[in-house]
Image: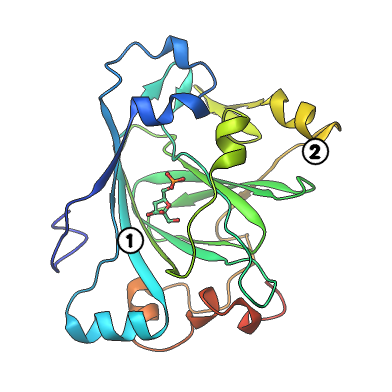
Amino acid sequence: MDRYWKGPLPEPSVRTVRDMACVLADPDAVAIDPDTPLYYMYRDLAMNEEDREILSRQNLRYDITVIPPAMLGREYVKTKGHYHPDSLSGIGYPELYQVLAGRAYFLLQKKDLTDIIAVSADTGDCVFIPSDYGHITINCSDMTLVMANVVSNLFSSEYELYEQLCGGSYYCLKGNLWSLNKKWEEYFKKSIPSYSIVNANEYKKLFFDNSSFIYNLATEGECLLCLSEPERLPSQC
Ligand SMILES: O=P(O)(O)OC[C@H]1O[C@](O)(CO)[C@@H](O)[C@@H]1O
């Protein structure tokens, strides 16, 4: 972590194999101790008191998540997956990620499942999670994935559907094969559209200078205030 964060570091929250069993393609094929840690979430980071004040004034949180490479049965290690609720304006809270090291897929799925996108991101790339999209991050490489996010601290993530339907709408299996999770079809009683794979650079929904670190964007101006006040989002988002 020293390479990615120079400020005070709280203890991380950890997700283990046991925590993740309910969202895996084949939990029975995971031949490792259920207490094995899979990823580490360092939440609510601030470099100093001044930055903390700036972040909290905007109701924003900066986190860093570290996901070492692993296979869980046929599936690449991934985050559990969740949706965000709507803000008081009736618009869903969005989120912004940046890959600090490694490579990832961000599997975004619209709440009504009319749109499913796998955004492929390399070190330095930013990925915007639009309002109304659930998301999972997949470490599809043999490198440790380190990623940062800025998100509003005004809500709690919603895990129910991901848990109930055993993961997202697609699983990313060994060899980067994508496999439909049929439980979503059964739940929505309709066929699920195919996913599109998009490179983070082609993925247009960015509204800031994406050569910056998102920590600086959150603490040196107010261009990420729209993450906690989504009614301020630019129209293209
Ligand atoms: O809560 P999940 O689905 O495991 O995802 C973890 C990620 O979500 C966050 O809580 C932000 O939405 C990060 O701290 C972390 O990277």
For residue 63, the mark is: 1
> Within 8 Å: ligand 1 and the Cβ of disc 1?
yes
> As drawn, is 130 to the left or to the right of 17?
right
Question: Dot 2: few (<14), some (14–19), or many (≥20) neighbours within 10 Å?
Answer: few
Expressed as whole percent of the image width and height from the top left, the position of residue 138 reads 46, 39
Please tell me which residue is depicted at 80% across the width and 38% down the height of the picture.
193
Residue sitting nearer the eye, 45 or 107 = 45
Residue 213 seen in render: no
Expressed as whole percent of the image width and height from the top left, the position of residue 154 reads 47, 70
**Structural distance between the alpha carbons of marks 2 and 1:** 32 Å
Residue 34 seen in render: yes
Expressed as whole percent of the image width and height from the top left, the position of residue 127 reads 52, 60
Q: Are dots 2 and 1 in contact, CB under 8 Å?
A: no
Residue 157 to residue 237: above or below:
above
Residue sitting nearer the eye, 57 or 98 = 57
Please tell me which residue is depicted at 57% across the width and 41% down the height of the picture.
160
Residue sitting nearer the eye, 88 or 220 = 88
Q: Amino acid at mark 1?
A: Asp
Judged from the image, the secondary structure of the residue bearing numbered disc 2 is: loop
Q: Which residue is mark 2?
A: 193
For residue 163, the mark is: none
> As drawn, is 198 to the left or to the right of 81?
right
Rendered image coloring scheme: rainbow
Q: Amino acid at mark 2?
A: Pro
